[in-house]
Each structure stands twice: as structure tokens, then as C-alpha cells.
Image: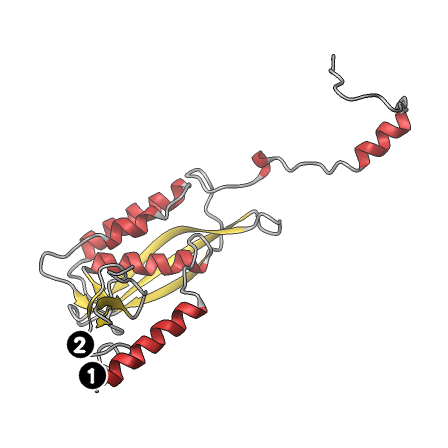
């Protein structure tokens, strides 16, 4: 193989077999990506799966729903070990929604086993609106439908296993919102609501974080939960 020399030659040395062997020892073998196990539809279900169960209690139903998400451990015991969702089950005493809930769990489980990035399911489920209207959860968070709350439960699980990044406000931003909250309560001589104990009773719904936490501060509508402001 011909190699063009662009610099002045100041010295030279003929490599021996010993030199080549010593250089090869310092070159770390690169891992073969093909050796890493990834989730796909032909992966055999193991004997044991590790799961988490999430409780959903809505004002629209007397009985709660319990969402169980079972995970599979891939590349166990190696530096590439990762936990990926494998299947979903939803159980409840209320049989009213049994048919579509069963269909939903089978579709979600199939998407999980298909492999790839399944995080898009969260936004798709959270975008489902109930034509009869949604409801507020404890803390003032608005849920447009039961399907959306199932999406929120899956989102919490994906964050727990590291598939979704947890985005939080920095310390400075949190202190700023806490100060604004205190100023608003002092100015209006009001108390926190029982429905959303962290936010004033005058607060309205934030369209970004879906929390009833938007108040008028310094002539600008500001969310005391996520910091969203019409004034930038």
C-alpha cells in the first residue's frame, strides 16, 4: 500500500516482529455490536420477568385500575445490561372497560416486544381525549382521559428504567418559582387549594404541563409548576 509522506523525515526504524506484537497488545479489542442482545419479536420469554405495578384511581370509576409492566433484562451481567419493557397487564374489579383495555394491553405489549424505541407510545396515549370530559388528579394535574393516565403510568415506568430522561427544573428556577408563589399568596392574601395544595385557588390550567398552576404575576401569566411564561 502506497502512503504519501508530507513531512520531512528526521529518523526511521524498521519494525521487528517483537515491535508489532507489543503494539498489538496495547490495542484493546473493540466490542462487536452484533454480540449485544436487543429486544425483538423473536426473543424468547424468560422464566422470570421483573415488574412494577401502578395504581390508577379516577373520579369516573368506583374501582381502581392496576397497571403491571413486566421488564426483561438484556445483556445481564455485562456493561451493556439494560432493562426493557416486555408486556403490560391491566386489572380492575370494574368490567365496564374490559374489552378495550384488554385490546390496548395486547397492542402495547406487541409494540414492546417488537423492539426499537417504544417511547412514542407515551405521547400517543396522553393525546387521547375523552368526549365526555377529563378530570383533575390530586395535585391539580389535568387528565383528558383514562387512556391518557395509562400513558402517564407507562411514562413513569420508562423514566424509572432509564428509557426516558427525567427533566427537572434547576435549583435556581425552583427557588424563583417558590418566591413568586409566596409573593402571590401574600399579595392576594389567599391560601392554597385543597385540590392542589401547592398552588393558589385562583390558578388556571397550564397548557404545557397540564397542571392548574398558572397565575398572573407582574402582568404576565406564569406557571408556578413548570415555569412556562407568556413573557418568555
Q: Position of residue 7 (x, y in %)?
A: 77, 22
Q: Which residue is mark 1?
A: 188
The reply to whether dot 1 and dot 2 touch (C-beta < 8 Å) is: yes
Looking at this view, name the residue that lies furthest to the left.
132
Give the label on residue 131, or none: none
Residue at screen point 15% across, 61% down: 96
Residue sitting nearer the eye, 192 or 139: 192
Q: Residues within 10 Å of mark 2 (few under 14, many from 20)?
A: some
Q: How many marks?
A: 2
Q: Position of residue 129 (x, y in %)?
A: 16, 55
Residue at screen point 34% across, 43% down: 111
Image side of residue 71 versus residue 198, left or right: right
Which quadrant does the C terminus fall into?
bottom left
Which quadrant does the N terminus fall into?
top right
Residue 214: image quadrant is bottom left
Q: Position of residue 157 (x, y in %)?
A: 39, 59
- Which comes sooner in the sequence, label 1 or label 2? 1
Q: Position of residue 53 (x, y in %)?
A: 37, 64
Which structural element holds mark 1?
A: helix
Looking at this view, name the residue that lies furthest to the bottom.
189
Residue 186: image quadrant is bottom left
Residue sitting nearer the eye, 179 or 103: 179
Q: Which residue is mark 2?
A: 202
Q: Between label 1 and label 2, give the one nearer the viewer.
A: 1
11 shown above or below 218? above
Residue at screen point 58% across, 47% down: 80
**3D distance between C-alphas at marks 1 and 2:** 10 Å
Amino acid at each position: 500500500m502506497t502512503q504519501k509522506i508530507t513531512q520531512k523525515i528526521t529518523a526511521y526504524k524498521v519494525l521487528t516482529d517483537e515491535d508489532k506484537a507489543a503494539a498489538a497488545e496495547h490495542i484493546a479489542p473493540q466490542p462487536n455490536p452484533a454480540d449485544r442482545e436487543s429486544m425483538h419479536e423473536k426473543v424468547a420469554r424468560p422464566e422470570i420477568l421483573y415488574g412494577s405495578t401502578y395504581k390508577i384511581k379516577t373520579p369516573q370509576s368506583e374501582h381502581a385500575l392496576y397497571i403491571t409492566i413486566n421488564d426483561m433484562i438484556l445483556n445481564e451481567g455485562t456493561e451493556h445490561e439494560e432493562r426493557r419493557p416486555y408486556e403490560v397487564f391491566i386489572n380492575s374489579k370494574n368490567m365496564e372497560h374490559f374489552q378495550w383495555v384488554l385490546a390496548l394491553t395486547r397492542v402495547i405489549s406487541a409494540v414492546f416486544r417488537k423492539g426499537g424505541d417504544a417511547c412514542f407510545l407515551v405521547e400517543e396515549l396522553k393525546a387521547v381525549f375523552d368526549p365526555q370530559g377529563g378530570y383533575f388528579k390530586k395535585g391539580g394535574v389535568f387528565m383528558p382521559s383514562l387512556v391518557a393516565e395509562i400513558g402517564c403510568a407507562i411514562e413513569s415506568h420508562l423514566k424509572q428504567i432509564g428509557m426516558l430522561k427525567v427533566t427537572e427544573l434547576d435549583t435556581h428556577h425552583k427557588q424563583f418559582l417558590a418566591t413568586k408563589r409566596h409573593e402571590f399568596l401574600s399579595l392576594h392574601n389567599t391560601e392554597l387549594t385543597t385540590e392542589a395544595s401547592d398552588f393558589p385557588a385562583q390558578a388556571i390550567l397550564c397548557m404545557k404541563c397540564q397542571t392548574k398552576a398558572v397565575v398572573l404575576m407582574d402582568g404576565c401569566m406564569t406557571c408556578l409548576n413548570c415555569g412556562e411564561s407568556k413573557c418568555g
